[in-house]
Image (tube, rainbow, N blue to C red):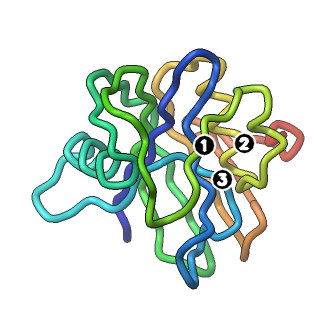
Amino acid sequence: MRLTTLCYLLRDGEALMLYRNKKAADPNGGKWIGVGGGLEAGESPEDCLLREVREETGLTLTRWRFRGLVTFVSDAWPTEYMHLFTADGFSGEPGDCAEGELRWVPFGEIPSLPLWEGDRIFLRLLAEERPFFSLKLVYRGDALAEAALDGRRLPPEAWR
């Protein structure tokens, strides 16, 4: 089981996105995601959030919101519990990232990027300002096989 954080930094109609293209054998390789990573011993999700954003972007968060818990179940990887955040307060300028290319992307362009299918669901929930949610995403290989929002199964037509 893995415990992780993921954050979408927001400014003026854009989100800071990370194109994962620098690490060999990266399960997220070739995809655009937010920034984050695994919790270390003794860290809270917020501790991890602040550390990972600083490590991956060089930015220091000053205002953030805990938006949801996403459970990833996969036939290829251990179950992951991802603590999902957005942040609209930060200081500094983005630097180089060892994991990939950082880019500010207008909200309207994000759906056209190569994304995990399940990410499209939680990105839509974030855009809709949905209150805190629990989302379960079940993958078979790289394909989304099942999704449930707050304990209720979502039909495939609701994934898009």
Callouts 1 and 3 close, C-beta under 8 Å:
no
78 on left or right of 63: right
Q: Amino acid at mark 3?
A: Trp
Q: Which residue is mark 1?
A: 103
Picture quadrant where residue 124 is located = top right
Residue 32, percent across and down? 66, 53
Q: Which residue in the protein does label 3 denote?
A: 32
Q: Secondary structure at mark 3?
A: strand
Which of pointers 2 and 3 lies earlier in the amino acid sequence? 3
Amino acid type shown at disc 1: Arg
Percent of width and height locating residue 56: 38, 54
Q: Quadrant of residue 75?
A: bottom right
Q: Residue furthest left?
A: 42
SS at circle 2: helix
Mark 2–mark 1 contact, CB under 8 Å?
no
Q: Residue at x 33, y 26 (%)?
A: 90
Q: Is 62 placed left or right of 97 in the picture?
A: left
User: Can you tell which of label 1 and label 3 is closer to the viewer?
Assistant: 1
The residue that appears at 50% across and 31% down in the rendered structure is 133
* 27 w.r.t. 97: above or below: below
The residue that mark 2 highlights is 120
Q: Position of residue 96 (x, y in %)?
A: 45, 55
Q: Residue at x 58, y 84 (%)?
A: 25
Task: Between label 2 and label 3, give the one nearer the viewer.
Answer: 3
Give the CA separation, mark 2 to mark 3.
11 Å
User: What's the residue type where badge 2 is placed?
Assistant: Arg
Q: Quadrant of the C terminus?
A: top right
Q: Secondary structure at mark 1?
A: strand
| Residue 23 point in image, percent of width and height | 53, 76
- Tag 3 or tag 1, which sits nearer the N-term? 3
Q: Residues within 10 Å of mark 2 (few under 14, many from 20)?
A: some
